[in-house]
């Protein structure tokens, strides 16, 4: 497991996720402030390339997850070549008015998913976010039409008003 992330989903309850070579993030849970953890296992919700996932609270009612949702397995046909292992880059915003994050958060109906990038000839990875009052910024590496995943950085602004327009 590589590049582990962590988010609190309820007071004292933690969700941990890690990039792997197994076609999904591996996840683990703690219900005692991180003193003990469940055994890490493949996520049934976050399939992904060999790329890190990012998750963050945007405010009291919203959480954003940014990741590459296409699992990659050795020998799998890649229409965009090596770059397509890290494309598309999607954002999943969980929440809204009176939303409470729980352990089964991805099974909730208040989910808005959209592509930040979907150019199969480029790669996008290592995202991070910065919340604003009525938006969030998402920064990530962009291959910029080269063979290097880390050749340039891009910042995208996403307004909460635009997210609300997405049909679930």
Image (cartoon, rainbow, N blue to C red):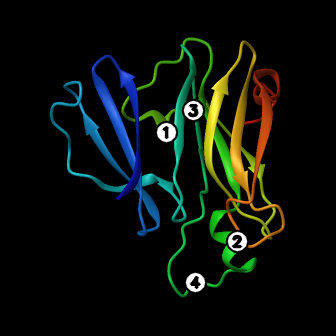
Classed neighbour count for the residue bearing mark 4: other residues with Cα under 10 Å, few (<14), some (14–19), many (≥20): few
- Left or right: 18 in relation to 121: left
Which of the two discs, 4 and 3, labels the residue nearer the N terminus? Answer: 4
Q: Is residue 146 above or below residue 150?
A: below
Mark 4 highlights which residue? 76
Q: Real-space Cα distance between discs 4 and 2?
A: 13 Å
Name the disc covering residue 106, or none.
1
Percent position of residue 93, x then y: 63, 33
Mark 2 vs mark 1, foreground winner is: 2
Q: Mark 3 sits on what residue?
A: 109
Residue 73 is left or right of residue 5, and the answer is right
Q: CA distance from mark 3 to mark 1?
A: 8 Å
Q: Earlier in the sequence, mark 2 or mark 3?
A: 2
Q: Where's residue 146, x and y in %?
A: 80, 70
Outermost left residue: 36
**Alpha carbon of mark 2 to alpha carbon of mark 1: how far?**
27 Å
């Amino acid at each position: 497991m590589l590049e582990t992330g962590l988010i609190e989903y309820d007071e004292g309850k933690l969700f941990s996720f890690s990039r792997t070579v197994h076609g999904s993030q591996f996840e683990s849970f703690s219900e005692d402030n991180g003193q003990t953890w469940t055994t890490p296992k493949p996520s049934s919700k976050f399939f992904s390339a060999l790329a890190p996932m990012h998750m963050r609270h945007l405010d009291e009612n919203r959480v954003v997850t940014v990741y590459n949702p296409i699992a990659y397995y050795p020998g799998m046909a890649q229409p965009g070549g090596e770059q397509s292992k890290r494309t598309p880059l999607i954002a999943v915003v969980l929440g809204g008015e009176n939303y409470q994050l729980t352990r089964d958060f991805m099974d909730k109906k208040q989910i808005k998913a959209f592509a930040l990038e979907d150019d199969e000839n480029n790669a996008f990875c290592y995202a991070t976010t910065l919340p604003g009052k009525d938006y969030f910024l998402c920064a990530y590496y962009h291959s910029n039409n080269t063979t290097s995943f880390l050749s340039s950085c891009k910042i995208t602004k996403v307004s909460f008003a635009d997210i609300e327009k997405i049909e679930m």
